[in-house]
Image (cartoon, rainbow, N blue to C red):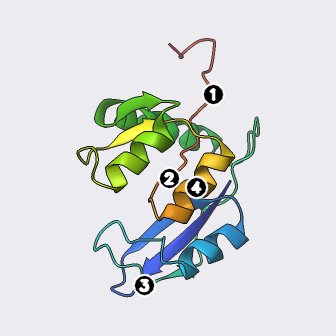
Amino acid sequence: MMIFGLICEDGHQFEGWFQDHGSLLDQMERGLVQCPVCGTTRVTQHLSTGGMLRRGGQGDGHQETQDFLRVLQQFIETRFEDVGPEFAKTALRIHYGVEEERNIRGTSTEEEDRLLREEGVPFLKVPLPVPQKGPGYN
């Protein structure tokens, strides 16, 4: 994963996680990158102190990244309904008004991801930290 610094037309700075630079450009072009402050999709990339997340890497900021991911995981687990492997089906039902709108989480296959994108269903894949063992970890 790569972290890119972004700024909206109103000057709000934020970061976004993307598979690679091509993914960032593709999502910006399709209007899928949105400012978390004002909601505009008119955003551009700017220089950032962000970086790359590598599996098992211990580079600069590794612990801070893991801590952030743990907080994010807790936020998602407490505020999103877990629909498990039914994520894509449930997301489509919500998108088309068959079910009430709500925050959901779960799993989906690459094929289901493609279908959701084709149908215009907004979703985000979030990398979660690998459980650690040893002193200081639960």
What kind of residue is marked 4?
Answer: Leu
Q: Earlier in the sequence, mark 4 or mark 3?
A: 3
Kindly report which numbered mark, 3 or 2, lies closer to the viewer in this rendering.
Answer: 2
Residue 107 appears left or right of 77: right
Residue 59 appears left or right of 41: right
Q: Position of residue 88 (x, y in %)?
A: 50, 43
Q: Earlier in the sequence, mark 3 or mark 1?
A: 3
Kindly report which numbered mark, 3 or 1, lies closer to the viewer in this rendering.
Answer: 3
Disc 3 element: loop
Disc 2 element: loop
Report how far apart the C-alphas of labels 4 and 3 lie in the structure.
25 Å
Report how far apart the C-alphas of labels 3 and 1 lie in the structure.
34 Å
Q: Quadrant of residue 2?
A: bottom right
Q: Earlier in the sequence, mark 2 or mark 4?
A: 4
Q: Residue at x 76, y 40 (%)?
A: 57
Residue 115 bears which disc, if any?
4
The total number of labels drawn is 4
Q: Position of residue 119 (x, y in %)?
A: 49, 62
Residue 129 appears left or right of 54: left
Q: Residue at label 2?
A: 124
Q: Residue at x 55, y 48 (%)?
A: 125
Q: Earlier in the sequence, mark 1 or mark 4?
A: 4
Q: Residue at label 1?
A: 130
